[in-house]
Amino acid sequence: MTSTKKNKISHRRDRKYDQDRQADEYRLLGESMKAARLKRLFSIKELAERARVDRSTIYHIEHGKPTISLFSFLNVLKVLDLYEDMMRFIDNDVQGNIIFKRKMMIKENTKNYKL
């Protein structure tokens, strides 16, 4: 077997692993969304009506289907009062802030050097 064929096979395996891992993450997110709905005592129909989406959209979110539009997903988050929590989480992006500060320090420190 040539090196190119081995690389293609390895790439396919890696991609399959990534897809499986991503599917697991979607399922976990869906389970969390379902738990949030149940804690708020919403039926699927009630949540769908409030979020202005179809009941099947709620079903797909809760079962981790990756085909849901971002618009629908965000509407559901808003109805569940989770949208603000998500935005605070993004605003408090500790890792992103650390990376940004490091890059700015490097930029400031290298500004004075000419190659």
Image: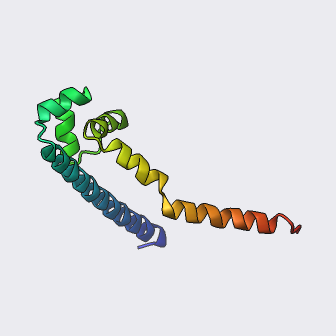
Is 23 located above or below residue 2 in the figure?
A: above
Question: Residue at 39% of width from left, 69% of height from top?
Answer: 10
Image quadrant where one finds the N terminus? bottom left
Establish if 63 lies above or below 97.
above
Residue 62 image offset from top left, x and y in percent: 19, 45
Closer to the camera in the image, 15 or 110: 110
Is residue 54 in sight in this rendering? no
Q: Quadrant of residue 80?
A: top left
Q: How is the image coloured?
A: rainbow
Instruction: Residue 75 in the image: state x and y as whole percent.
Output: 31, 34
Farthest residue in the right direction?
A: 114
Whether residue 15 can be seen here: yes
Left or right: 70 with respect to 30?
Answer: right
Quarter occupied by the C terminus:
bottom right
Location of residue 73 with respect to 91 vertically, above or below:
above
Point out residue 76 in the picture as x, y percentages from the top left corner: 27, 37
Residue positioned 18% across, 33% down in the render: 47
* 97, 27: nearer the viewer: 97
Q: How many marks?
A: 0
The one of 33 and 57 positioned closer to us in this rendering? 33
Q: Residue at x 47, y 72 (%)?
A: 3
Looking at the image, residue 93 sits to the left or right of residue 50; the answer is: right
- Residue at position x 58%, y 64% in the image: 99
The percent coordinates of residue 2 (x first, y second) are: 45, 72
